[in-house]
Image (cartoon, rainbow, N blue to C red):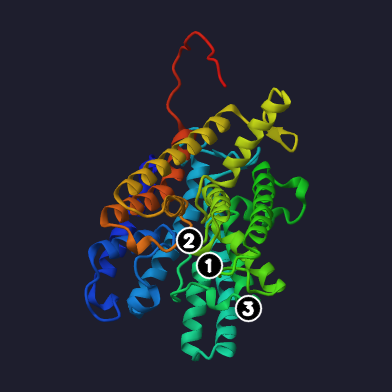
Amino acid sequence: MLRNPIRLVPSLFLLAIAIGTVLLSLPIATADGSRAPFLTALFTSTSAVGVTGLVLVDTGTYWSAFGQAAILLMFQIGGLGIMTAATLFGLIAGRGFSLRDRITTQVERSQLETGDALSVLKLVFSIMIAVEAAVAVILAVRMGASYGMSAGTALWNGVFHSASAFNNAGFSTNADSLMGYQSDPVILMPVMLAVILTALGFPVMQDLRDKRLQWRRWSLHSKATVYGTAALLVLGFVALLAMEWGNPATLGPMGIGDKLLNAAFQSVMPRTAGFNSVDVGAFRDETLLVSYLLMFIGGGSAGTAGGIKVTTFVVLFAIVLSEVLGRRDAGLFNRRFGKEVERQALTVTVLAATLVFAATTYIASITSLALPDILFECISAFSTVGLSTGITADLPPSAQVVIVLLMFIGRVGTITVATALAVGRPSRPYRYPKENLIVG
């Protein structure tokens, strides 16, 4: 197994999903003591382990305290597993070297030895404890002081939402997610900041720890991730603010301060997390279109985010820019990309788009739901975002199974494909004659 991480990652996630499904199928897991239907348990378990956040039932009322705790444990394990697996297997994939050899990474020209795996895990756990504890305390105190919750209820809600934010899971104990706090920056801001931090991915966190704000010393990966993330957040903020400014079902009735706060919050959430402070189902079509792009791209590599990843999008953008400008090589910040990286980015993007297209086509063929809503649901599932226009529970069983597959493939598929492409197979000792096609 250790020699084949391509099989190890999906196997571990399948095992976690199976255990979660069993736990949620127990009578003690539901509020009324009945057994949850198998598909409901499977769907919720996959969504939790895959840190997605799509649900068929209301988390806060359908599941008991045991069930909610099981869900929290699942997305906590799923988030940590994703961060550590994506990071460590990304390091291992330095051309197929064994675990006993020095591991060459693609984070610019730096190198890590296998002994550094312990340092990786320590960093992940230390960040998890610090961020989750800080956010949990802020949320618990605020909920208890301003929303009339008992100390126990406020503490549980604070811990649950804090862990959900850190792991980009998007699960909430509230039926309307965080819409009840849309005018409260003390609730929304910590959640938003936790999501942004962990969505950047471990390599960026490592650079921030080791090199602080010495930007010139950052790796190319960190620079591309931070700049790409900032650009997408600004794009989402401006687009959502402009398109929803007068929408009476979303930002329209709010004051300017609340509009700015919720536009910022909703520009962050489509990237990976899935919380919502306004009704996503009431978004205008043009806002949904921008959300498609933000969700499909997702967050940073080797973190809790889903999607094709920011760096994949940045590489593709750089390739297009280099072709338009007539440059020989594609790259950024006075560094050029390797051809293998360009092929990996193209492959991941095409496979992801094909998968989403196929799933959307199938669901559209068996339901009468609006196509924009179906496409939104499929991208959200594949990119493990968790946002929904409200059609999840209305999908027929076969469509719900498709969403389950999308959540699973979207979570482990990008890691598996990227690792497989990086490890590769032995190259052929020959090359075919070259002949070009007419393109465009």
The C terminus lies in which quarter of the figure?
A: top right
In the drawing, what numbered circle is on residue 292?
A: none
Query: Looking at the picture, how far across and down is residue 66, in whole percent?
Result: 33, 77
Q: Badge 3 local density, few (<14 within 10 Å), some, or many (20+)?
A: some
Alpha-carbon span between mark 2 and mark 3: 20 Å
Residue that protrudes farthest toward the top in the picture = 433
- Name the amino acid type tagged 1: Asn
| Disc 2 target residue | 387
Alpha-carbon span between mark 1 and mark 3: 13 Å
Alpha-carbon span between mark 2 and mark 1: 7 Å
* Precedes in sequence: disc 1 or disc 3: 3
Q: Badge 1 local density, few (<14 within 10 Å), some, or many (20+)?
A: many
**Residue at figure coordinates x 48%, y 12% from the top left:** 431
| Vertical comparison of 167 with 82: above or below | below
Marks 2,1: beta carbons within 8 A: yes
In the drawing, what numbered circle is on residue 184?
A: 3
| Disc 1 target residue | 276
Query: Looking at the picture, how far across and down is residue 193, in whole percent?
Result: 63, 66
